[in-house]
Image: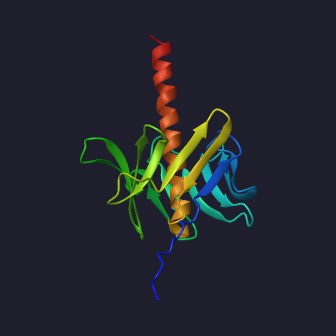
Amino acid sequence: MDSQPTLILAAPAHLLIFSADSRKNATILLGSAPAYIISKDPIDFCTELRAAGTGQALAQITWRDVLPDVITFPQINATEMHLRKWLQKAALPNGSLAHIMDTGYGQFILKTHPVHRLALFHEGDLQTPVAYWQSDATAPVALVIQARVCPDVQVHIIAAFIVREFKLRMRKKANQVVLINR
């Protein structure tokens, strides 16, 4: 009997849709169901990522004025890590800057992208993003995460995108203030 080639379709990517164009206060939908909630406490300057169904804290980012910003993953280990150690700035072989996130599933490289604004790549493949922003004027902002990404890493990816997007927006605001004051 002759064997027939089998076509295996890749699983569709996870499309996480943000309810608002905010990385501080938003509900993140998976399909039409709330999956995560991002909230910022103005008193202790903490941004928290929680599971929508249980309210369980998954990541906490503490923004500080003098001391280094820190991140905590309560479900993994409740130890605070400096953001600059968790997302280490590095120069890529082509000279561009990126941030390296080391996980138990290998290293991921988060960098600005000409099409997606921010894109995340797995080590060894800087051509095909495993996660990226999807945004246009007619649809809400979404984070696309490829299905092949281990679910345990998904919280790290969301937190990394929140941190880098916040930093990019703060840099843009600072540049606008400088231009206005000239």
85 vs 34, left or right, is: left
- Quarter occupied by residue 51: bottom right
Measured from the top left, where is residue 178 in percent x and y?
A: 45, 18
- Residue 26 visible at all: yes
Instruction: Name the residue at 51% across, 69% down.
Output: 150
Position of 23 with respect to 91 (left or right) is: right
* Of residues 126 and 19, the one drawn nearer to the viewer in this rendering: 126
Residue sitting at x 50%, y 20%: 177
Q: In this view of the protein, which residue sits in the foreground, 28 or 64?
A: 28
Which is nearer the eye, 138 or 159? 138
x 36%, y 46%: residue: 98
Q: How is the image coloured?
A: rainbow
Taking the view exactly as shown, the residue that stands out farthest to the bottom is 1
Residue 99 percent coordinates (x, y) = 38, 49
* Residue 39 showing in the rendered view: no
Q: What residue is rendered at 53% in x and 65% in y?
A: 10
Above or below, 143 relative to 12: above
Instruction: Give the left or right position of residue 104, taking residue 74 as reference.
Output: left
Please say if 40 is above or below 179.
below
Viewer-nearest residue: 146 or 163: 146
Up the image or down, 170 lies above or below 176; here it is: below
Query: Looking at the picture, how far across and down is residue 32, in whole percent?
Result: 75, 55
Outermost residue on the front side: it is: 1
